[in-house]
Image (spheres, rainbow, N blue to C red):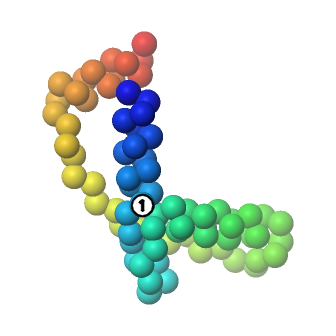
Amino acid sequence: MARKITEEVNQWLNKRAKYRDKQHTWSAILLLKTREMAQYLVGKRKTIDFVSHVYEIERQDNMEIRQLLLYIFYF
């Protein structure tokens, strides 16, 4: 189960999105935004830009799998 979750997260992080008029992977965007926030926190930047990026997900599970996951996470 953990392997499936990490595969899904890796697959999501490798998808591309438009950021600052270029296509980047979500992992690169996450790295850039983390670096930007760190620079803001230590005073190297005066402003920080939190822009909402749109990401669409298509569900591939059914209600039975959702209930199983909820059961696993609560016990």
Residue 28 in sight here: yes
How far across and how far down the image is residue 2, in percent? 43, 30
Q: Amino acid at mark 1?
A: Asn
Q: Is residue 4 left or right of residue 38?
A: left
Residue 52 in sight here: no
Residue in view at x 76 percent, y 70 percent: 39
Q: Mark 1 — residue?
A: 14
How far across and how far down the image is residue 4, in percent? 37, 35
Residue 25 position (above or below residue 11)? below
How far across and how far down the image is residue 42, in percent? 83, 66
Residue 58 position (above or below residue 6)? below
Label 1 crowding class (10 Å Cα cut-off): few <14, some 14-19, many 20+?
Answer: some
**Given the current orientation, which residue lies at the most extreme bottom position?**
21
How far across and how far down the image is residue 11, in percent? 38, 53
> Is residue 12 or residue 40 the one in the foreground?
12
The quarter of the displayed image where residue 8 is located: top left
Residue 15 position (above or below residue 23)? above
Classify the position of the C terminus by image quarter.
top left
Classify the position of the N terminus by image quarter.
top left
> Is residue 58 or residue 50 the one in the foreground?
58
> Is residue 62 or residue 13 the one in the foreground?
13
> Is residue 47 or residue 11 the one in the foreground?
11
Residue in view at x 68 percent, y 70 percent: 36
Residue in view at x 78 percent, y 64 percent: 41
**Given the current orientation, which residue lies at the most extreme top position?**
75
Residue 7 position (above or below residue 73)? below
